Amino acid sequence: LRLPCALGTECYYANPALHEVCPSEIIKFEINKYTNPSLWIEFEYISRWVGGHVRKIREDSAFGKLLFFTKEEAEQALKEERK
């Protein structure tokens, strides 16, 4: 199994519900034998509207879709979503 990044990696969450980019941190990886892909990523983020939260998503829904390593990539993803 190859992890996409290390625990504690700082990244940016393109929060589609609130249309904002939230600073976040990877806090946990989990293997779920009942899903494919089996790797889940748990991250903590801080929203300026609702405060701190934790979210868990599958790897295929994470990086490049909702989680990004740069703020600019996350902002671009939100712009594309609005079109």
Image (tube, rainbow, N blue to C red):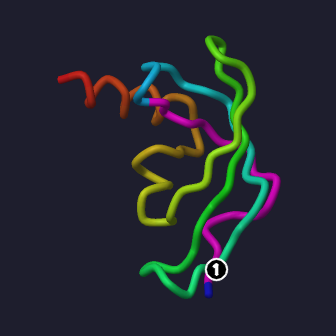
Residue 69 location, quadrant: top right
Relative to 74, is 41 above or below? below
Q: Secondary structure at mark 1?
A: strand
The location of residue 78, given as percent across then percent down, is 37, 27
Nearest the viewer among 17 and 66 is 17
Q: Position of residue 55 (x, y in %)?
A: 63, 46
Q: Is residue 7 magenta?
A: yes
Q: Which residue occupies the extreme top position in the image?
A: 49
Residue 65 among those drawn in magenta: no
Q: Residues within 10 Å of mark 1 (few under 14, many from 20)?
A: some
Residue drawn at (71%, 26%) of the image: 46
At label 1, the amino acid type is Ile
Residue 14 position (above or below residue 26) = above
Q: Which residues are magenta?
A: 2-15
Residue 25 figure quarter: top right
Image quarter hosting the N terminus: bottom right
Residue that sits furthest to the front in the current view: 34
Q: Which residue is mark 1?
A: 31
User: Which quadrant is home to the C terminus?
Assistant: top left
Q: Pick the residue in front: 34 or 18.
A: 34
Q: Position of residue 27 (x, y in %)?
A: 78, 54
